[in-house]
Image: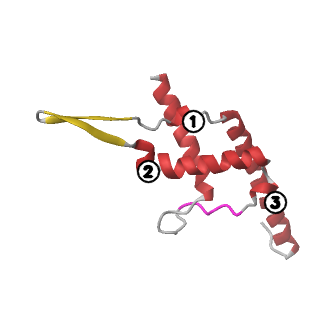
Amino acid sequence: KFNIINKALLSMAIIGYSRPFVKSSDGVEKGQSVLNVRLRDIFDDFEIVLHKKIISYRHQAIAHSDYENRALKIIKSEGNGFVIGGMLFDIQSELIDVEKLISMCKKLIKHCVERMFEVNRKLQSLGFEP
């Protein structure tokens, strides 16, 4: 039971983290805009690698369940049924540095808040009041 809960929480964290960085398959931004940020301005090299892995996991294994990550095959027929074999993709086996992911989320929040205040200051300098 604990394993299933951890897997679900990690999967949702990956989906939530990825959401501002991806568009829907039809290219339309739905619900949330795509975050326009230069990763090098926020993350170090290790964090950029982790960011790319997280987005890849989101695309290939969690949100879209690509075949390569969930490959099952029929082994042999058993009367009226069949036996399948293969290994299901398990996000927990990827050994994601969750503490680093949390740190990256905090950096992104800080960046977004700073940008929000910057935009607000620019608007005020142009005469717009909140």
Q: Which residues are magenta?
A: 31-36
Predominant SS along the magenta part: loop
Q: Position of residue 19 (x, y in %)?
A: 58, 54
Q: Position of residue 28 (x, y in %)?
A: 52, 69
Q: Is residue 42 above or below residue 25?
A: above
- The residue indicated by pointer 2 is 66
Element assignment for label 1: helix
Give the residue at mark 3.
Answer: 117
Q: Is residue 119 magenta?
A: no
Compared across the picture, whether 109 is left or right of 17 comes to: right
Rounded to the nearest angstrom, the CA distance separating label 1 from label 2 is 16 Å
Q: How many marks?
A: 3
Reading the image, the residue beneath label 1 is: 94
Task: Choose the circle earlier in sequence order: 3 or 2.
Answer: 2
Mark 2 residue type: Asp
Q: Residue furthest top?
A: 1
* Residue found at the far right of this picture: 125
| Residue 98 visible here | yes
- Element type where label 3 sits in the image: helix
Q: Residue at x 79, y 52 (%)?
A: 42
- Which amino acid is tagged 1? Glu
Disc 1 vs disc 3: which is toward the camera?
1
Q: CA distance from mark 1 to mark 3?
A: 37 Å
Side (left or right) of 71 relative to 16: left
In the displayed structure image, the side of residue 81 where residue 60 appears, left or right: right
Kind of residue at disc 3: Phe
Residue 65 in view (yes/no): no
Q: Residue at x 44, y 23 (%)?
A: 1
Query: Mark 1 or 2 closer to N-term?
Result: 2
